[in-house]
Image (cartoon, helix red, strand yellow):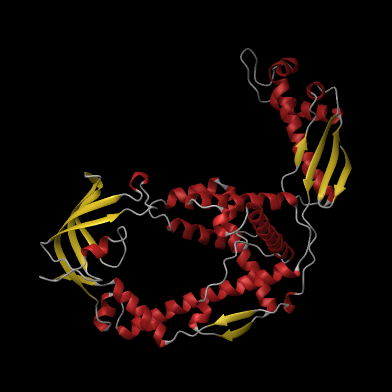
């Protein structure tokens, strides 16, 4: 095999690979002998089929198979010999001349093809100990615990029917209703025994306000328009009339936050429930703290490293991001003009995001490779179990899906690998801690679509 570099431009490479016809012939002969010893055809004893007859029956397909194997092997050998790692699968350009291909398959001509690919860039790591990182830490105070308990109590609100009670904010009203549009009954806007909590906004705007003040056994007619953005096309903006019959009005009764309430939730007493709530809040704070610390780390890694990016990876990432963005705009029936930008400006913005994702993905992969960071089988198994638990009753199908789809399994592995690399760098960077309030910790940051979904 002869390998010649015909082009080298930045990360782009093109090689010319020539496989002598004699080598192809030897491989074909070896394959023919392998088949000859095992094939069994009608009229011949096993292993006694004449070689000429085998060539007549299977020669062309076997030669094509042999050539494909040689192409695959020579591609891998070319990369190994040159100690190069392709960013994506190399592109193989076989001869376009059908006559030349025919001569190769007949064993009369050398096989020559071009191999094009982009290599991964060399990355010079920064001194991670010099990174300036801050870990935000917030204490769980009594006010946060009280607020959480109040939320839990609100979720456990019960409703008690009260005779003569007028519907008010927070009440649950049960009623029958029939909707009319253009004088005709609308079955899709009618129902019986509808239970509605006033203030939750379950129905179209104005409906809840129309029910306020009514009492059980009363009838009420509500007239309003369907919203212009209503999901049913032929009802958008249409005036409607709803004939309602009130059947029950129930007042909300929120439970007292005491030992009995705690015990109803499985806690020994209120103090134990407070401890459980405090631990849950602490876990949530820790999660937010880590997310912000990781975000800060990735920002600094992005800024402190500059290297050429494989165009194919950037293009693929941009196309993925762009498809998602345009799909969301179409779903919301919006355009870039609604966001005060042109399509060209949006493309430039998302190209920058794609470049950030690729840069961080390559960098995280490089850090992991150089420092022998790996995802263990136990870690992957635990992640797979956690994913399967999200689909109760379908766990077996989930396991089978990942067993049969290496790409899906790689996507499951990627965030684990990324977090392990992040932990490794944070250990070297030694972030300083900064006490902040709950509000400061939970303050949302500008959304950044450029965070990498996987380390690559």
Q: Quadrant of the N terminus?
A: top right
Residue at point 34% right, 83% down?
272
From the viewer's perspective, tell me whether residue 161 is left or right of residue 228. left
In the rendered image, residue 370, in percent from the top left (x then y), is placed at 74, 64
Residue at point 72% right, 65% down?
367
Relative vertical location of residue 123 with respect to residue 33 in this rendering, above or below:
below
Relative vertical location of residue 350 with respect to residue 170 in this rendering, above or below:
above
From the viewer's perspective, tell me whether residue 371 is left or right of residue 274. right
Question: Total marks drawn?
Answer: 0
Q: Quadrant of the C terminus?
A: bottom right
From the viewer's perspective, tell me whether residue 125 is left or right of residue 349. right
Residue at point 66% right, 25% down?
38
Q: Outermost residue, top direction?
A: 43
In the rendered image, residue 136, in percent from the top left (x then y), is placed at 57, 81
- Rendered image quadrant of residue 123: bottom right
From the viewer's perspective, tell me whether residue 11 is left or right of residue 350. right
Q: Is residue 192 visible?
A: no
In the rendered image, residue 291, in percent from the top left (x then y), is placed at 56, 71
Q: Is residue 306 visible?
A: yes
Q: In this orientation, which residue lies closer to the viewer: 194 or 294?
A: 194
Relative vertical location of residue 375 with respect to residue 319 in this rendering, above or below:
below
Q: In this orientation, which residue lies closer to the viewer: 354 or 15?
A: 354
In the rendered image, residue 220, in percent from the top left (x then y), is placed at 16, 59
Relative vertical location of residue 111 with respect to residue 144 in this rendering, above or below:
above
Q: In this orientation, which residue lies closer to the viewer: 387 or 175?
A: 175
Residue at point 63% right, 17% down?
41
């Amino acid at each position: 095999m002869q390998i010649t570099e015909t082009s080298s431009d930045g990360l782009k490479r093109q090689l010319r690979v020539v496989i002598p016809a004699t080598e192809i012939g030897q491989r074909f002969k070896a394959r023919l002998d392998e088949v000859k010893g095992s094939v069994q055809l009608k009229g011949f004893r096993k292993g006694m089929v004449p070689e000429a007859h085998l060539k007549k029956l299977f020669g062309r397909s076997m030669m094509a198979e042999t050539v494909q194997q040689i192409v695959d092997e020579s591609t891998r050998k070319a990369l190994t010999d040159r100690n190069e790692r392709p960013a994506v699968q190399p592109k193989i350009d076989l001869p376009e001349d059908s006559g030349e291909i025919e001569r190769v398959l007949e064993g009369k001509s050398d096989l020559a093809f071009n191999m094009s690919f982009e290599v991964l860039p060399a990355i010079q790591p920064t001194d991670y100990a010099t990174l300036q990182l801050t870990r935000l830490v917030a204490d769980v105070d009594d006010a946060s615990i009280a607020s959480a308990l109040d939320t839990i109590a609100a979720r456990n609100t019960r409703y008690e029917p009260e005779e003569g009670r007028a519907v008010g904010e927070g009440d649950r009203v049960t009623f029958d209703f029939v909707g009319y549009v253009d004088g005709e009954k609308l079955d899709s806007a009618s129902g019986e025994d509808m239970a509605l909590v006033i203030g939750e906004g379950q129905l179209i705007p104005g409906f809840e306000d129309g029910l306020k003040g009514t009492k059980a056994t009363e009838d009420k007619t509500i007239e309003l328009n369907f919203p212009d953005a209503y999901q049913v096309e032929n009802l958008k903006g249409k005036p409607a009339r709803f004939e309602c019959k009130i059947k029950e009005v129930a007042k909300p009764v929120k439970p007292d936050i005491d030992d009995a309430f705690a015990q109803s939730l499985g806690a020994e007493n209120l103090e134990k429930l407070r401890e459980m709530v405090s631990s849950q809040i602490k876990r949530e704070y820790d999660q937010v703290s880590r997310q912000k610390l990781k975000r800060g780390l990735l920002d600094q890694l992005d800024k402190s490293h500059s290297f050429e990016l494989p165009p194919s990876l950037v293009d693929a990432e941009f196309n993925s991001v762009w498809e998602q963005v345009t799909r969301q705009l179409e779903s919301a029936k919006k355009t870039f003009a609604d966001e005060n930008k042109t399509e060209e400006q949006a493309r430039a913005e998302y190209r920058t995001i794609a470049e950030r994702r690729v840069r961080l993905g390559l960098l995280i992969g490089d850090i992991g490779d150089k420092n022998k960071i790996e995802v263990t089988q136990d870690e992957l198994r635990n992640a797979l179990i956690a994913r399967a638990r999200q689909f109760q009753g379908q766990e077996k199908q989930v396991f089978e899906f990942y067993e049969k789809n290496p790409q899906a399994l790689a996507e499951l592995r990627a965030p684990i690998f990324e977090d392990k690399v992040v932990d490794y760098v944070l250990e070297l960077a030694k972030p300083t801690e900064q006490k902040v309030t709950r509000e400061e910790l939970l303050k949302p940051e500008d959304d950044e679509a450029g965070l990498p979904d996987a380390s690559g």
